[in-house]
């Protein structure tokens, strides 16, 4: 980072207030920063809007520029923990083994394969650094090799806007075919003896509402085989375990519907498994004419059922739903199948027999807090399973589980070049009683010699049923090694303790998520882990909404807060059906246009509307100009309102990536530098020696 403190403005920018209001359900809402939404979006060309964003970026540079050395030191420290010339473990698929590599100093991967019969040879399939050369942003989306091994279909995004363009490479000649496939937003499925590609296309609002078939070598219009008419539903194609059926899955956040199409003839009439029913989610795979269905139709924690292809809607329970075990996934293989789930919040991997459903073998994992699951297992007939495992003190580990022997073979443990000694750290898993009596799990990593009462960083997400895994991170060591404890609050809204844990944090129960985070923070103070004002906190997207809500509710608890691409303008976004994701989000947050109750509930917690005249902690907020998920004006409007209302002198920074989207800058080192900026901000504001 260049130190621009001497030339950039010292005073924070002030966004004009322009009178704007609207009335819904008899309630008038004032929104004086509504002008920050460029009416030409997704193009952003309004000079007033751009001038404000640039002014905020200049202020960010001026303030963080004073700590450029700290950022540089942290970046070097984090990079030293990264094995730069790293590679994935090769995995067999047919006649080849596939893997990817980073070369030292490279931002992006190269992708390779080698014939199983000639393991000493290797073939470069795709050169990420070459594709990204000269681009400010690059993301590889789909990556799929044809069944015959000759062609590679892949897609790229060069703006961060999540509209991908598809390409096909002839691996025999190394040349690109003339095919250009626009607006891809799913993976590619090869069909009809590798003469066709099946994929999902995004419409102008980023919603994948149709599945198309592309004929190899064809440059004309692709043919639609499914169009989703229900607003808010998206569709995605997949491939069955035996690769003989294309699985068309459509749904929103709480309802789904599946159709099956023969891979040999993607234009055949689809087989509807069962008609959609509000609140019922299900997934399907098929083996030798028998459908396997994971569904929550008769238990909140899902059951596994079977059905015949002739009567796909008549389901017979294979594994009943359980109050204790949360069944999250399954995968079919030739001689056995695998179920995955969580027991008491910890990941489980179970092998099961087709002949006897009562036969179940669970793979044991020894640590108190960890995350584990199936890795990439592309082949149907296998005698070993690829697994991934990590914990807060165990770096990412790749195993092969030998099914016949019941034995784990370690293939790779993530290397930390600068060194890492797990014995120097302590992992705890505690439970905190929330204000309504719910027991919230918390995973805590700290140095074994840490002094009680020191600084603590608290992270959470709390939405969409996403469970934050207690995994390994080298970047968080930069806090922990400076005396911080690092805690993950497994709050409601995620499904850490089962599907009901998620349901207790959505719609009318949404405020449980925010209350859980505040209650965990207070409990960590009461139990002596830290002190009031000595907690730093962070979250992104819906986790950024969490940050906005908790600083409104209990600002005194926090000494620094980082909100990445925060979803803080909840009410306005949920009222706008023309925004990319809004219709599909109503099942998560509620529809305030149709429901007065939902309107008042969202208005009551929406971080933007609930900013008030009070002291706020120091805050760093990020945004992406091309972000289709949390549009740039949400964090911009929130920061503008905070500046106008907060009664303190604490620092408030907004950084907008002008050429990136929801995930921030692309490239492993660019992303790492942004992490270094975040940690530097926390250390600066928490008064920890630089």
Image: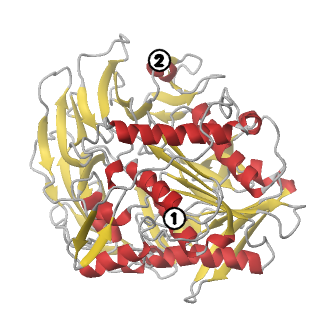
What number is the disc on residue 586? none
To which quarter of the image does residue 160 belong?
A: top left
Local crowd size for mark 1, using a 10 Å CA cut-off: few (<14), some (14–19), many (≥20): some
Q: Secondary structure at mark 1?
A: helix
Q: Is residue 594 left or right of residue 164?
A: left
Q: Which residue is depicted at the point 76% across and 34% down?
A: 69
The image shows residue 255 at horizontal and vertical percentages of 27, 67
The image shows residue 382 at horizontal and vertical percentages of 48, 45
Q: Is residue 328 left or right of residue 287?
A: right
Q: Quadrant of the N terminus?
A: top right
The image shows residue 510 at horizontal and vertical percentages of 43, 75
Q: Earlier in the sequence, mark 2 or mark 1?
A: 2
Q: Secondary structure at mark 2?
A: loop
Local crowd size for mark 2, using a 10 Å CA cut-off: few (<14), some (14–19), many (≥20): few
To which quarter of the image does residue 83 belong?
A: top right
Q: Which residue is depicted at the point 34% across and 12% down?
A: 175
Q: Quadrant of the C terminus?
A: top right
- Relative to 266, is 463 above or below? below
Q: In front: 71, or 374?
A: 71
Q: In front: 141, or 330?
A: 141
Q: Which residue is depicted at the point 25% across and 45% down?
A: 39
To which quarter of the image does residue 20 belong?
A: bottom left
Tell me how the rendering is colored. Answer: secondary structure
Q: Which residue is depicted at the point 40% across and 63% down?
A: 354
Q: Which residue is mark 1?
A: 645
Q: Is residue 227 left or right of residue 54?
A: left
Is residue 569 something one can see in this rendering?
yes
The CA distance from mark 2 to mark 1 is 42 Å
Is residue 496 something one can see in this rendering?
no
Q: Which residue is mark 2?
A: 134
Q: In front: 373, or 28?
A: 28
């Amino acid at each position: 980072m260049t130190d621009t403190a001497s030339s950039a403005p010292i005073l924070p920018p002030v966004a004009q207030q322009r009178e704007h209001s609207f009335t819904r359900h008899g309630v008038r809402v004032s929104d004086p920063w509504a002008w920050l939404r460029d009416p030409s979006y997704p193009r952003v060309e309004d000079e007033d809007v751009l001038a404000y964003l640039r002014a905020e970026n200049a202020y960010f540079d001026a303030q963080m520029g004073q700590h450029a050395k700290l950022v540089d030191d942290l970046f070097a420290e984090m990079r030293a923990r990264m094995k730069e010339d790293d590679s994935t473990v090769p995995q067999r698929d047919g006649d080849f083994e596939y893997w990817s590599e980073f070369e030292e100093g490279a931002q992006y991967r190269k992708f390779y394969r080698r014939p199983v019969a000639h393991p000493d040879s290797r073939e470069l399939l795709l050169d990420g650094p070459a594709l990204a050369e000269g681009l400010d942003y690059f993301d590889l989306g789909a990556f799929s090799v044809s069944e015959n091994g000759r062609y590679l279909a892949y897609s790229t995004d060069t703006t961060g806007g999540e509209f991908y363009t598809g390409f096909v490479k002839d691996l025999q000649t190394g040349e690109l075919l003339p095919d250009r496939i626009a607006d891809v937003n799913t993976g590619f499925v090869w069909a009809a003896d590798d003469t066709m590609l099946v994929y999902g296309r995004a419409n102008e609002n980023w919603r994948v509402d149709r599945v198309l078939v592309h004929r190899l070598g064809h440059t004309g219009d692709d043919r639609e085989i499914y169009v989703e008419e229900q607003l808010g539903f998206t569709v995605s194609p997949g491939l069955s375990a035996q690769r003989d059926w294309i699985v068309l899955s459509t749904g929103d956040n709480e309802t789904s519907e599946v159709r099956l199409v023969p891979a040999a003839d993607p234009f055949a009439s689809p087989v509807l498994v069962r008609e959609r029913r509000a609140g019922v989610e299900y997934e399907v795979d098929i083996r030798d004419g028998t459908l396997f269905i994971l569904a929550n139709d008769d238990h909140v924690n899902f059951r596994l059922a079977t059905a015949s292809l002739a009567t796909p809607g008549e389901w017979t329970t294979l594994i009943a739903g359980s109050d204790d075990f949360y069944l999250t996934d399954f995968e079919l293989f030739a001689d056995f199948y695998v179920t995955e789930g969580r027991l008491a919040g910890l990941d489980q991997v179970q092998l099961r027999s087709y002949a006897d459903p009562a036969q179940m073998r669970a793979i044991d994992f020894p640590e108190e807090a960890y995350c584990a699951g199936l890795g990439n297992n592309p082949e149907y007939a296998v005698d070993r399973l690829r697994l991934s495992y990590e914990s807060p003190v165990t770096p990412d580990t790749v195993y092969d589980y030998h099914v016949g022997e019941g034995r784990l073979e370690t293939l790779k443990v993530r290397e930390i070049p600068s060194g890492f000694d797990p014995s120097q750290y302590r992992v705890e898993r505690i439970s905190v009683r929330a204000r309504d009596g719910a027991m919230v799990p918390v995973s805590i990593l700290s140095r074994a010699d840490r002094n009680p009462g020191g600084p603590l960083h608290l992270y959470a997400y709390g939405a969409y049923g996403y469970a934050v895994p207690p995994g390994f991170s080298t970047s968080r060591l930069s806090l922990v090694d400076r005396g911080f404890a690092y805690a993950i609050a497994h709050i409601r809204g995620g499904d850490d303790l089962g599907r009901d844990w998620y349901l207790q944090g959505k719609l009318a129960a949404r405020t449980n998520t925010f209350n859980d985070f505040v209650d965990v923070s207070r409990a960590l103070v009461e139990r002596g882990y830290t002190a009031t004002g000595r907690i730093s906190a962070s979250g992104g997207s819906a986790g950024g909404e969490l940050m906005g809500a908790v600083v409104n509710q209990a600002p005194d608890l926090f000494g620094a807060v980082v909100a990445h691409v925060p979803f803080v303008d909840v009410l306005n976004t949920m009222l706008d059906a023309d925004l990319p994701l809004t219709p599909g989000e109503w099942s998560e947050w509620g529809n305030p246009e149709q429901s007065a109750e939902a309107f008042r509930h969202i208005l009551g917690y929406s971080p933007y509307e609930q900013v008030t005249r009070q002291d706020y902690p120091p805050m760093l907020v990020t945004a992406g100009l091309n972000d289709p998920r949390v549009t740039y004006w949400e964090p911009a409007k929130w920061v503008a309102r905070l500046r106008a209302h907060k009664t303190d002198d604490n620092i408030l920074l907004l950084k907008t990536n002008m050429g990136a989207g929801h995930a921030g800058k692309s490239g492993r080192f660019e992303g790492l530098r942004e992490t270094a900026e975040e940690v530097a901000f926390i250390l600066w504001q928490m008064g920890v020696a630089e």
